[in-house]
Image: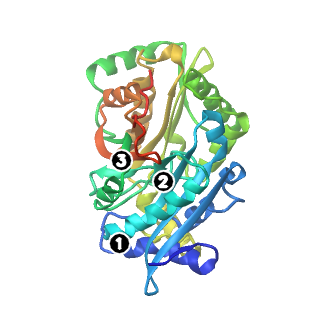
């Protein structure tokens, strides 16, 4: 069966349209926005092209597209970590293991020709908050915006080929009306009664200030982590500009101690509840549908995107306080019914403990796999963050 590189508008269209065949009878599937996927492969839109390379292919049989895959390398990350790692992603295939393995083999051979020793997948040619991981538990819940989604039969495709679990990714869920557990609630109330602590929502008209507050806490929280070089000011501002079009000021809170930024909780409306009505196309009709459903209040869920606490204030109740301030705001305005918290790796037990203490329960599990080119090399799971 021919495997063809995506090099023109026709093959790109075939690549983009395949999921509609795979999921046509799946009531939970929400298509990614076409423009979002195109942007991943566009050097003008995706900064990872500056220090990496990406290829994508489709598998056909008698003129019918039955599978697709992308393979990529982040040279900058490999140089920093002194490893030769490549990635695969955007995999889709009909329920035929032989065809799936042909795609894996083709991508593997290309990566091997680039001197890659380890393959990770399915991942993104970009940041980890998008298109990362394979669902391995709970296939009966819609994906949040830019989350990977897959049928259950993809799991044996990966594992039978030789991919092994590198780490699990947990997505959590809670109702907005749920109270904090008593011990966390008590700590939260003590924090909120302390006049040195203040809380405020983000303001769209002053994004540079909050970008810098976000960067300050983020860098402090991750400073001791291996391989962390620190977030630059322009990167923090780029994040704020990216989320600005859809942010709800009531969902993004910052905590301060004596005026110093010490914590943040960043959440966004779960816009996939709207995007499921636009069928992957944000053309003028799609934009009208988006505005209609936004006006109608179709979004009843928000998703927690990022949580950060300065190390000096961790495990003292600030996590619960900042989350509870946000929770009480949205419940008082009757804006949202529940919250989904984006994935946390099993290599980060401390953050998992924080989220569970907020009363959230595990909703879904994904997996990031690794494939070692040297089949006799020892396999190791992702290191636990201490």
Residue 325 in the image: state x and y as whole percent: 44, 30
* Residue at x 72% of width, y 34% of height: 233
Q: Are marks 1 and 2 in contact (CB under 8 Å)?
A: no
Alpha carbons under labels 1 and 3: distance apart: 20 Å
Label located before the other in sequence (3 or 2): 2
* Residue at x 50% of width, y 55% of height: 88
- The residue that disc 3 covers is 366
Q: 208 and 386: which one is in front?
A: 386
Q: Nearer the viewer, mark 1 or mark 3?
A: 1
Residue 248 in the image: state x and y as whole percent: 53, 46
Q: Quadrant of the C terminus?
A: top left
Q: Are marks 1 and 3 in contact (CB under 8 Å)?
A: no
Helix, strand or loop at label 3? It is strand
Helix, strand or loop at label 1? It is loop
Q: Which mark is residue 94?
A: 1
Q: Is residue 54 left or right of residue 153?
A: right
* Residue at x 61% of width, y 26% of height: 219
Q: Which mark is residue 131?
A: 2
Q: Which mark is residue 204?
A: none
* Residue at x 47% of width, y 69% of height: 68
Q: Are marks 3 and 2 in contact (CB under 8 Å)?
A: no
Decide if residue 16 is in sight here: no
Residue 154 in the image: state x and y as whole percent: 33, 60
Asked which quadrant contains residue 331, the reply is top left
44 is higher (above) or lower (below) than 116? below
Helix, strand or loop at label 2? It is loop
Q: 327 and 183: which one is in front?
A: 183
Residue 75 in the image: state x and y as whole percent: 65, 45
Alpha carbons under labels 1 and 2: distance apart: 19 Å
Other residues around mark 1 within 10 Å, as few (<14) / some (14–19) / many (≥20): some
């Amino acid at each position: 069966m021919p495997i063809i590189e995506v090099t023109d508008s026709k093959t790109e269209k075939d690549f983009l349209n395949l999921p509609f065949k795979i999921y046509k009878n799946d009531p939970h599937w929400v298509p990614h926005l076409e423009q979002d996927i195109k942007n991943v492969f566009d050097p003008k839109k995706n900064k990872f092209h500056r220090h990496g390379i990406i290829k994508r292919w489709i598998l056909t049989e008698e003129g019918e597209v039955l599978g697709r895959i992308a393979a990529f390398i982040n040279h900058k990350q490999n140089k920093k970590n002194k490893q030769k790692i490549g990635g695969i992603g955007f995999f889709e295939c009909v329920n035929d293991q032989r065809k799936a393995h042909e795609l894996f083999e083709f991508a593997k051979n290309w990566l091997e020709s680039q001197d890659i020793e380890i393959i990770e997948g399915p991942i993104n040619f970009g940041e980890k908050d998008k298109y990362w991981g394979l669902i391995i538990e709970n296939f009966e819940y819609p994906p949040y915006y830019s989350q990977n989604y897959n049928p259950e039969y993809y799991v044996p495709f990966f594992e039978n080929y030789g991919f092994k679990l590198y780490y699990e990714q947990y997505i959590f869920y809670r109702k907005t009306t749920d109270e904090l557990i008593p011990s966390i609630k008590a700590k939260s109330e003590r924090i909120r009664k302390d006049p040195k602590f203040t809380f405020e929502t983000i303001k769209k008209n002053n994004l540079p200030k909050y970008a810098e507050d976000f960067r300050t806490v983020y860098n402090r929280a991750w400073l001791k982590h291996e391989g962390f070089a620190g977030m630059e000011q322009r990167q923090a501002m780029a994040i704020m500009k990216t989320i600005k079009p859809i942010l709800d000021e009531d969902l993004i809170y910052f905590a301060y101690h004596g005026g110093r930024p010490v914590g943040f909780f960043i959440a966004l409306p779960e816009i996939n509840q709207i995007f499921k009505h636009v069928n992957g196309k944000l053309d003028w009709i799609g934009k009208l549908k988006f505005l209609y459903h936004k006006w109608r209040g179709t979004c009843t869920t928000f998703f927690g995107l990022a949580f950060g606490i300065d190390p000096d204030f961790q495990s003292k109740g600030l996590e619960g306080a900042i989350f509870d301030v946000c929770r009480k705001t949205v419940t008082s305005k009757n804006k949202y019914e529940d919250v989904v918290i984006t994935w946390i790796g099993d290599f980060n037990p401390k953050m998992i403990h924080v989220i569970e203490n907020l009363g959230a329960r595990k909703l879904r599990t994904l997996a990031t796999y690794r494939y070692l080119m040297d089949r006799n090399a020892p396999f190791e799971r992702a290191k636990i963050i201490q």
